[in-house]
């Protein structure tokens, strides 16, 4: 990954973290959402965003709600980073299950 991709990924990660804190009740159904990783495509047109969802009654429902609101999230992001980016990348959300995987391995080792 280039330095430019890395810098943009960090900006997006930070701003989305702030966004999910502010809108936890409306978009995330009260769950705590943290952005674990952001990966940018080489042409900076697509951002793959890996998120972890904690404290939700139904993680799948919270994730679907985030995906359904991806246009509103992208619009918010474009307003915040308009001075740093010419074009706001398309947002693709994925559930990061590395924490659950690590917990499962830890339980197996015990």
Image (cartoon, rainbow, N blue to C red):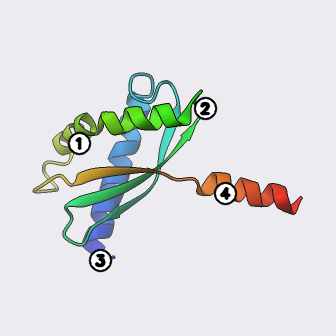
Residue at 35% x, 39% y is 67
Mark 1 surroundings within 10 Å by alpha-carbon count, few (fewer than 14), some (14 through 19), many (20 or more): some
Q: Disc 2 vs disc 4: which is toward the camera? A: 4
> Which percent across, then down, holds residue 53?
54, 40
Q: Secondary structure at mark 2?
A: loop
Residue 109 circle label: none
In the picture, residue 27 is in which quadrant?
top left
Left or right: where does residue 44 sit relative to residue 100? left
The answer to the question of whether label 2 and label 1 lie on touching residues, with beta carbons closer than 8 A, is no
Residue 2 circle label: 3
Q: Which residue lies under the disc numbered 2?
A: 55
Question: Is tag 4's residue or tag 3's residue first in the polypeptide sequence?
Answer: 3
Q: Quadrant of the C terminus?
A: bottom right
Question: Is tag 2's residue or tag 3's residue first in the polypeptide sequence?
Answer: 3
- CA–CA distance in space, label 2 to label 1: 24 Å
Q: Secondary structure at mark 1?
A: helix
Q: Secondary structure at mark 4?
A: helix
Q: Secondary structure at mark 3?
A: loop
> Which percent across, then down, holds residue 12?
31, 52
Residue 74 circle label: 1
Q: Disc 1 vs disc 3: which is toward the camera? A: 1
Q: Is residue 90 above or below residue 64?
A: below
Q: Is residue 14 above or below residue 53?
A: below
Q: Nearer the viewer, residue 65 or 18?
A: 65
Q: Which residue lies under the disc numbered 4?
A: 101
Residue at 16% x, 55% y is 84
Q: Is residue 37 above or below residue 80?
A: below
In the picture, residue 45 is in which quadrant?
bottom left
């Amino acid at each position: 990954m280039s330095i430019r991709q890395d810098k943009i990924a960090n900006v997006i990660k930070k701003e989305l973290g702030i966004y999910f804190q502010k809108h936890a009740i409306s978009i995330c159904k009260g769950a705590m959402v943290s952005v674990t990783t952001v990966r940018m495509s080489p042409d900076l047109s697509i951002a793959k965003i890996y998120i972890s969802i904690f404290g939700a009654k139904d993680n799948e429902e919270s994730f679907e709600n985030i995906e359904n609101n991806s246009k509103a999230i992208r619009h918010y992001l474009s307003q915040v980073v308009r001075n740093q980016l010419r074009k706001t990348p398309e947002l693709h959300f994925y559930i990061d299950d590395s924490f659950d995987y690590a917990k499962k391995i830890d339980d197996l080792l015990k």
